[in-house]
Amino acid sequence: MWNLTCLKVLEHGGSVLRGLCRTKGRVVACVGQSHAWICSSSGNPSATQANRGLSQPPWRVLFFGSDDFAVESLKKLNASRGDGAIVDLLEVVALSSSVPVRKYAEEHRLRVHDWPDVDFSSQFDVGVVVSFGCLLQEHVIKKLPYGILNVHPSLLPRWRGPAPVFHTVLHGDKLTGVTIMQIRPKRFDVGPILSQELYPVPEKITAEELGTSLAVVGAQLLVDTLQNLPERIAYRREQAKEGATFAPKISSSLSWLVWEEQTCEEIDRLFRAIGSRIPLRTIWMGRTIKLLDFVGKCQPFLAGSYSAAVPGSIRYQKESNTLLVCCKDGWVGFKTVKLKKRLSAADFYNGYLHQSYLNKSPTQTSCQFQSYRERTQHFLKGQNAKPLQLNTGVS
């Protein structure tokens, strides 16, 4: 099971409990002590380090990244350059010409390397990889005396894999965070942890909103880690074997709804996890219909007339201009749907739910969506992941 150190939040001042400390008003897991010396990714100082005396910043950093989440860390590193700063040299490795990381690098005149043709002649001290999408080989890692750090938006070992933020929201976690780890070859997200920061998940937040927040948290934690890098590496800790879960990529098959099996809460979490990228879908008269502008769990105004409804049943609530759909334990609402074009709830009712239309249809005699039961369940296989709860007391 996932075990989390409990924190007692004091009104005046911070507290240090079980290896956790408060840095600049933020709760950070400290992996290290006050006296440490430089060590390479293999655990010993390299000849390059000894010759250059690399026991403190500024560092020569090689950054690997692609998306907007990665750009936030790159911005923070770029802002940390200059006299007396944390970063001396900053260069970027990008996959293609269209990714946000490359665009930012070019706009700010940072040298860009085209993966996998990386020029290591600048004698970088450390690498940073954020949302890069490629597994870095051992020979690449060994070219960097301090190895390569990864900014991962979860509390590892929970949610290893490419989509941790989506699965945090999908599974209803109350607590998440960011992990700074050293990468290892051959496997993603299994390396030793240098630092972690906890982040309570706000209610009703979307995966997109949470990702934006964690990008900012992760960027600052990265800079804090680089500030004391030799110490953090010297006292790094291996990931626990217990509590590991996998966060595979989100598939479009996940968007199909099964009204008989999914609760209001599960549909709400699903929409907040994927709705900004993949619309929720169901079947209407043999055709795919996309359900948009989700409003959450709804209470019918006339409860008696809804009591005999079966999952998939549809009602139009004129007072709120909302399309209500019955699921496993109640009703959820949508303001808009899309067949061939976008339709408001009122337009869909007038065009497809009115009794005069149903009387003309040889196959549709009731107002009901059909579940798509062949949807892939790969995202749940092997998970059995219970929500990660937030404890505020000390046992």
Image (cartoon, helix red, strand yellow):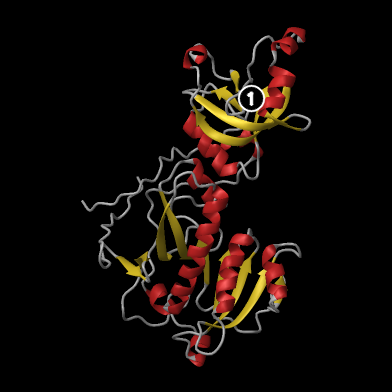
Q: Which residue is drawn at 50% across and 47% down?
A: 205
Check disc 1 and report the residue beneath it: 372
Does residue 297 appear to the left or right of 236 in the view shown? right
Count of residue discs = 1
Viewer-nearest residue: 339 or 247:
339
* Rendered residue at 32%/50% (across/down): 3
Image coordinates of residue 287 in percent, x first then y, are: 74, 23
Residues 102 and 232: in front is 102
The vertical placement of 221 against 336, above or below, is: below
- Residue 140 shows up from this direction: no
Residue 248 is situated, as x and y percent measured from the top left of the image, at 56, 46
Q: What element carries label 1?
A: loop
- In the picture as drawn, the residue positioned furthest to the front comes out as 319
Q: Determine if residue 350 is in view.
A: yes
Residue 178 on image: x %, y %:
46, 60
Callout 1 crowding tier (Cα within 10 Å): few <14, some 14–19, many ≥20: some
Q: In which quarter of the image is the N terminus?
A: top left
Q: Residue furthest left?
A: 395
Q: Is 374 located above or below residue 44 in the figure?
A: above
Residue 239, relative to residue 342: is it above or below? below
x%, y% of residue 246? 50, 47
Give the residue at x 25% y 51%.
393
Q: Which of 388 and 231 is in front in this view?
A: 388
Q: In this view, does 386 lie to the left or right of 373?
A: left
Residue 45 falls in image quadrant? bottom left
Q: Hey, which quadrant is residue 108 in on the image?
A: bottom right
Q: What residue type is labelled 1?
A: Tyr
